[in-house]
Amino acid sequence: MKNEIKAPRSTKPPWLKKRLSSGRHYDKVVGLIKSGNLHTVCEEAHCPNLGECFSNGTATFMVLGDHCTRNCRFCAVQHGPPEPPDKEEPGRVADAVKKMELRYAVITSVTRDDLPDGGAAHFAAVIRAVKQQNPGTKVEVLIPDFQGSVKNLKTVVAAVPHVLNHNLETVPRLYPQVRPQANYHQSLKLIQRVGAIDPGLATKSGLMLGLGERNDEVKEVLCDLLSVGCAFLTLGQYLAPSKNHHPVVAYISPESFLKWEQTALEMGFRGVASGPFVRSSFHAGEMFENSKI
């Protein structure tokens, strides 16, 4: 697998140009988010799929506010002192899921190192509220590392989501530059612990490509994920939110992403989404349904 175009360059390659979407469903989703005083990672992280997902009536809810206590060099989410958790938020998320008639809901959060439990209890409350109001809806959560706390992880798992996602984001060598407040082996251990706590709960993780990783390093990470029982994988192109973020080192071609998908499936992952625009929750419901877990 070869990185055909090296960055930096003045313009993105043609495969990274995307038409904006709009329409009735788009306006409905935007209205529900605003009226419910909710946040989506789609907006906060400047996701390139925002228009497509909103137009299809889907969104990834971001709970526990819109200010993160960490300052990862790849992320567009605001950094700074956050507000206390909103006790009414679980109900509002559940209500939005119902109004959007979602069969599959994805819930993530900012990292809340300021809270004693890292926000685990709030996460669990959101999961329970969504399931109570929407008994036919599958719930996927994309969680932070909880600073390695097994107790906090158990709190989330006890709420019984259908998929638990925790992204490794990049290869170990790049953690000091990309995720200086995180630890690769701690994140890997979190995924392994999920299987020990609840063997029936499917786990998921993802990587951004184009940060300066080597192919052999990516392959090693995939082996690590399989060794801890990770079922689902996402691979997408890293796009720098601003000039102040980690630079894009390479633009990965669609053909290379396809080869990575084939490789990952051959290695043993149950479901893989790999492409320039793929993000953590990209077609998450389809991946889960197609896996027959």
Image (cartoon, rainbow, N blue to C red):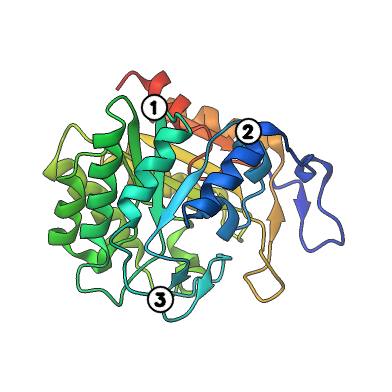
Q: Are marks 1 and 3 in contact (CB under 8 Å)?
A: no
Marks 1 and 3: which is nearer the front? 3
| In the depicted structure, whether residue 238 falls above or below residue 17 | below
Residue visible at 26% across and 58% down in the picture: 122
User: Can residue 223 be seen here?
Assistant: no
- Within 10 Å of disc 3 (Cα), the crowding (few <14, some 14-19, many 20+) is some
192 lies left or right of 134: left
Q: Are marks 1 and 2 in contact (CB under 8 Å)?
A: no
Q: Amino acid at mark 1?
A: Phe
Secondary element at image label 1: helix
User: Can residue 185 be seen here?
Assistant: yes
On residue 288, which mark appears? 1
Can you give x and y, in whole percent of width and height, for residue 39 in the image? 49, 56
Can you give x and y, in whole percent of width and height, for residue 258 in the image? 62, 31
Residue visible at 69% across and 61% down in the picture: 249
Secondary element at image label 2: helix
188 lies left or right of 67: left
Residue visible at 14% across and 45% down in the picture: 158
Can you give x and y, in whole percent of width and height, for residue 118 in the image? 26, 67
Q: Are marks 2 and 3 in contact (CB under 8 Å)?
A: no
Q: Gap in Å between the C-alphas at discs 2 and 3?
A: 31 Å
Can you give x and y, in whole percent of width and height, for residue 212 in the image? 61, 61
Mark earlier in primary sequence (1, 2): 2
37 or 244: which is nearer to us?
37
Q: Quarter of the image for the C terminus: give it.
A: top left
Secondary element at image label 3: loop
On residue 25, which mark appears? 2
On residue 82, which mark appears? 3
Q: Gap in Å between the C-alphas at discs 1 and 2?
A: 23 Å
Mark earlier in primary sequence (2, 3): 2
